[in-house]
Amino acid sequence: MSIQLQIITPEYIIYEGEVEAVTVPGKGGKFQMLENHAPIVASLENGTVRIKATKEAKFKHKKLKKAEENCWDLEVTGGVMELQNNFLTILPD
């Protein structure tokens, strides 16, 4: 069970790979996306993107902080995200 995640800024790629789940701070509140989630495009608010990793995931970027076992956090001040066909792209501010 996984989704393909890309987190991209104009300067660099923060992460590319498979993950189990992603929780984002949306304009209407936090929401989580899992495999086979309905397609969605949403704006992000100031807050934390939490990534639940697969065992194979490798997080090396300095902006990703380990939150708990198999979970990593990325602080964002806004941005946009799109999920379609188990492929999630996050473009943080």
Image: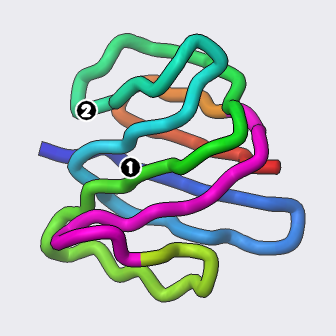
Q: Residue at x 37, y 76 (%)?
A: 66
Contact? badges 2 and 1 (CB < 8 Å) = no
Q: What colouring method underlies this structural image?
A: rainbow
Q: Which residues are magenta?
A: 66-80
Q: Does label 2 or label 1 sit earlier along the sequence?
A: 1
Residue 22 image point, x, y percent: 37, 43
Give, as a three-letter code, the residue at label 2: Leu
Relative vertical location of residue 57 with respect to residue 43 in this rendering, above or below? below
The CA span between labels 2 and 1 is 10 Å
Seen in the picture, residue 43 relative to 50 is either above or below; the reply is above
Q: Residue at x 36, y 12 (%)?
A: 38
Q: Kindly indicate the quadrant of the structure image that contains residue 44.
A: top right
Q: What kind of element bears circle 1?
A: strand
**Helix, strand or loop for disc 2:** strand
Which residue has dot 2 on it?
A: 34
| Residue 11 sits above or below residue 51 on the image | below
Which of the pair 72/29 is nearer the observer? 29
Q: Within the image, what quadrant is residue 82 found in?
A: top right
Q: Which residue is mark 1?
A: 4
Q: Residues within 10 Å of mark 1 (few under 14, many from 20)?
A: some
Position in image of residue 88 (x %, y %): 49, 39
Residue mark closest to the camera, 2 vs 1: 2
| Quadrant for the N terminus in the image | top left
